[in-house]
Image (cartoon, rainbow, N blue to C red):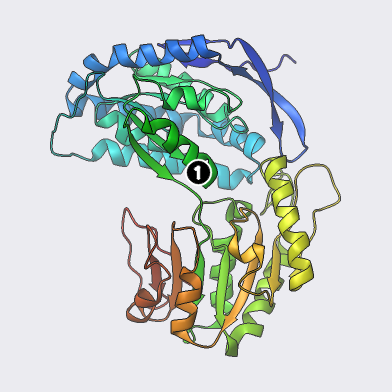
Amino acid sequence: MKAREYRMLIDGDLIAGSSAFDVINPATAEPFAQCPKADEAILERAITAAKRAFPAWSAKSIEERARLVDKLADALEARAPEFAGLLTSEQGKPLDQAMFEIMGSVFTLRAFAQMRIEAKSIRNANGNLVIEQMNKLGPALVTGNTMVAKPAPTTPLTTLLFGEICKDILPPGVVNIICDQNDLGSKLTSHPDIAKVAFTGSTATGKKVMASAAGGVKRVTLELGGNDAAIVLDDVDPIAAAGKVYDGAMANAGQICVAIKRAYVPEAMYDDVCNELARLAKAAVVDDGANQGTQVGPIQNRMQFEKVKKLLDDARQRGRVLAGGAPLDRPGYFIPPTIIRDLDDDAPLVREEQFGPVLPVLKYSNIDDVIARANDSEYGLGGQSGSTSISRSTPTSPSADRSSRESAGNSEKRACTNTPRRTL
């Protein structure tokens, strides 16, 4: 059977690249598809198309733009199984989690299509041109921006598939999608016709994006690394708290920017929480995300797989492994859910963002001390705390220096549309 061909969306047309590169299925560590690769000429075409489309697109009423974004949501929902299957193949997550993510994208597009903001016009000599990651596409379109999107080279295909939907619904040039192997990023972010850059990824790459955009004094939005801490308070049931911490740490094999990456537990319940976390980890079904019943899939790519292995090798020398602790002896980038206790605060697994299914669990005896320990990090994405009372958990949420605070109680739950919250 002939392999499916994927194309980049440029100025309303689906085009081939100047060359192509393999896309790896992390469950097998083998190529399963090819992705078109843009060169500088294709990049220039994409930017020119976005610039040309901007005046007409931004002149439309917000209601008309929102209607088209709603149509994007409808089209994505209609093809959700196809998108979910492709996402599992290139990213590795279990199929049910992939479907949840796709439907979350549908919900997000519809939510932004329904929002109305005060009309303001902000222009420069080049127009209000934007480069956006796809999870920020809805608000960018509704507010009248055109864009060039560049997905990660390890997971480009779902974005290219979304381009097929955009081609049928949006005017040419409003959304353009290019793919590369991380060789065009600086040319894109430094281009004089790019007025705004939004990037989601590692801190190291984010620094490069900011430096590249600085020459043009561009507006930049960065969502970078995190090393989110969860503080369990002493008034919760340890078994229930362990379940909440486990879910927050192991979803998508720990590969979520606001996943729990270190947990602090009162000394009096430390053993109980650790033992329950280990039980849950040992019971998890680790397999190819395409197989029914899989709960934890692989690490997404070899580079990240090797990083997590290195952190594990060090942690085994410093602490006590209760579950997991080593890659599975099978093809693919599989590391089982791993629980490690008795590490010092200066252990690399505690200090760094592991971005994998590995959770260090640390004990504490003093609440002020543990808040200071949780906040002693170069990262600033989020933090969580858990108690039976919102009034207790909110002040202890390790987010005094964080971009988001997540706190909730078992008996009192609150929600907010723009701030994630987790009940521990």
- Position of the N terminus, as image quadrant, is top right
Tell me if residue 202 can be seen: no
Q: Is residue 144 above or below residue 265?
A: above
Residue tagged 1:
101
Tally the numbered discs: 1
Residue 380 sits in quarter: bottom left
> Residue at position x 62%, y 79% from top?
273
Measured from the top left, where is residue 226 in percent x and y?
Answer: 50, 55
Tell me if residue 386 can be seen: yes
Q: Nearer the viewer, residue 18 or 281?
A: 18
- The answer to whether residue 406 is left or right of residue 58 is right
Q: Is residue 176 above or below residue 318?
A: above
- The answer to whether residue 395 is left or right of residue 33 is left
| Crowd rating for badge 1 (residues with CA inside 10 Å; few <14, some 14–19, many 20+) | some
Q: In the image as oriented, which residue stretches furthest toward the right?
A: 329
Measured from the top left, where is residue 159 in percent x and y?
Answer: 51, 28
Measured from the top left, where is residue 314 in percent x and y?
Answer: 75, 63
Q: Is residue 107 above or below residue 55?
A: below
- The answer to whether residue 225 is left or right of residue 352 is left
Q: Is residue 117 above or below residue 242?
A: above
Q: In the image as oriented, which residue stretches furthest toward the bottom?
A: 268
Q: Secondary structure at mark 1?
A: helix
> Residue at position x 68%, y 69% from top?
280
Residue 131 sits in quarter: top left
What amino acid is labelled 1 in the image?
Glu
> Residue at position x 60%, y 59% from top?
352
Measured from the top left, where is residue 399 in percent x and y?
Answer: 40, 66
